[in-house]
Amino acid sequence: MIDQPSTPELLEAMAATLAETVVPACEGAPQHAARVVANLCRILARECADDGAATAATTEDLQRLLGSPAPLEELVVALDQLLMQGAASTTLDDAAVRSVLMANVERRLDLSKPGYRE
Amino acid sequence: MTDTADRCAAGLAEVLAEAGHGEPQVSIAGVASAGATRRTLFLEVLLGEQTIPAVAQISSASTLLGASTTVEDEAELVRIAEAAGVPVAQVLGASNHNDLVGGPVVITRRVDGVTIPRHVLRSLQGDAAAGERLTMQCGTALALLHAVDHTVVPASVPVLDPAGPAPAYVQQLSDTLDGLGTSHPALRYGIRWLGENVPSSPETPALLHGDFRNGNLIVSPAGLGAVLDWELAHIGDPMEDLAYLCMRHWRFGSELEAGGFGRIDTLRDAYVAAGGTWRDDAFSWWLTARTTWWGIGLAFQADNFSNGITTSIVHAASGRRVVELEYDLLTLIGSQS
């Protein structure tokens, strides 16, 4: 039915094993790689626990900003292309754009590096 | 030693012999932590009866974003910087190609001290005076470098348009971002802002290190021992080097703006005292521009992983670090708007 531990729990356990067992047992490039993988496991654990909430919020923000019901991938490309055209040639409000960008960045940061904003 | 290590040591001896060091014997004493683009080996070089501790840096196929100078020209730049009074690791030999070594290589004397940023910051912990001294030494070293007659540098050293290095840089950033397989609107927003807010141009362009930051400095109890990794050297606006040292990304969690170990005021005063000209508007702009550049650089590394150009887990992980630079970038723009 439902396997235990959950995906976030397993990823946290993998991170702890790498950080507490593997990292102290090696040095140089392998040690650095183990640290990096441990950190990635923690990021993925938080992404699993978030369950798409951050992505959904950004999709809503972009749909409102661009007035389009398109999916996230298309909205990101559309915003990128509008920004390439420069401020003078778009009708986008600069403050609104920056606000949407910052909100997206803050949501992603909370998953990839909590505490960075403090 | 393995056959591979034996071949590498023989190749390194060839490079040293070609540089006029007689008939050296090279033994590989250890492998330092491998960087994203270079492998670093500790060497013992036996020259006659003298043993010289040395370091070999071997470049990989996957180079740093923006690197185009050959290692032989890079070695020449280090010699030029040394003659100008910049602390460097003295070059013993360099080769753009050696079959036995397996890649372009630069061999230098070993300089005592630490280079890993967190080790550097730990070595200065609780000693504010040592951090300030290191900051002053950085300001002085950059002023000496920027005073070099840039017309004597090797022709392969890239030149940012002297008439307007900032607009030229914006175009480079835009072109690089265009070349990525994914869209990054926050970085695009940064490029747009940079294009709309170009600063004053320097009176004269200068030879820049291009990657002057905590991590590319050897630091000992006496302070700055050597400036390493000259592969991104180019001709441009001197404020670029000063701003880059002060990026949040290179502070490694410290609140001190200059490299994580000193204050901007200290850096500026030392730079000016050693003959440099400081421009506030250009400093702020280049801080934003270099933050954008490194955000694109990390996205570039992740792109290389996704496209199968590299299997490095470090490059794969870079994709989750782009957002840190995007945050810094939007914060910097917010503070200047």
Image: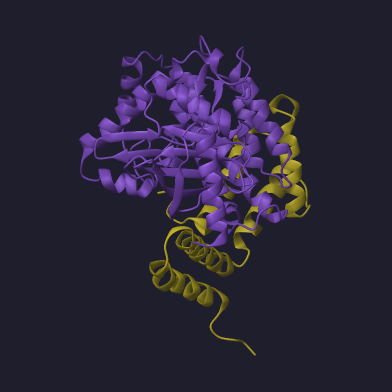
Chain letter, yellow: A
| Residue at the image position 41 percent from the left and 17 percent from the top | B278
Q: Is residue A58 left or right of residue A117?
A: right
Chain letter, purple: B
User: In x, y percent, where is residue B202?
Assistant: 51, 13
Residue ranking furthest to the bottom: A1
Q: Relative to B39, is A11 above or below?
A: below
Determine which quarter of the picture holds residue B50: top left
User: In x, y percent, where is residue A6?
Assistant: 55, 80
Asked if one can make out residue B303 in the rendered structure from this viewpoint, the answer is yes
Image quadrant for the N terminus of chain A? bottom right
User: In x, y percent, where is residue A101?
Assistant: 60, 43
| Between A100 and B34, the one nearer to me in the picture | B34
| Between A59 and B206, the one nearer to me in the picture | B206
| Residue at the image position 63 percent from the left and 17 percent from the top | B161
Asked if one can make out residue B337 in the rendered structure from this viewpoint, the answer is no
How did the renderer colour the structure? Answer: by chain
User: In x, y percent, where is residue B308?
Assistant: 71, 56
Determine which quarter of the picture holds residue B193: top right
Q: Is residue B291 left or right of residue B87?
A: right
| Between B103 and B39, the one nearer to me in the picture | B103
Q: Relative to B53, is B171 above or below?
A: above
| Between B318 and B198, the one nearer to me in the picture | B318
Q: Relative to A41, is B174 above or below?
A: above
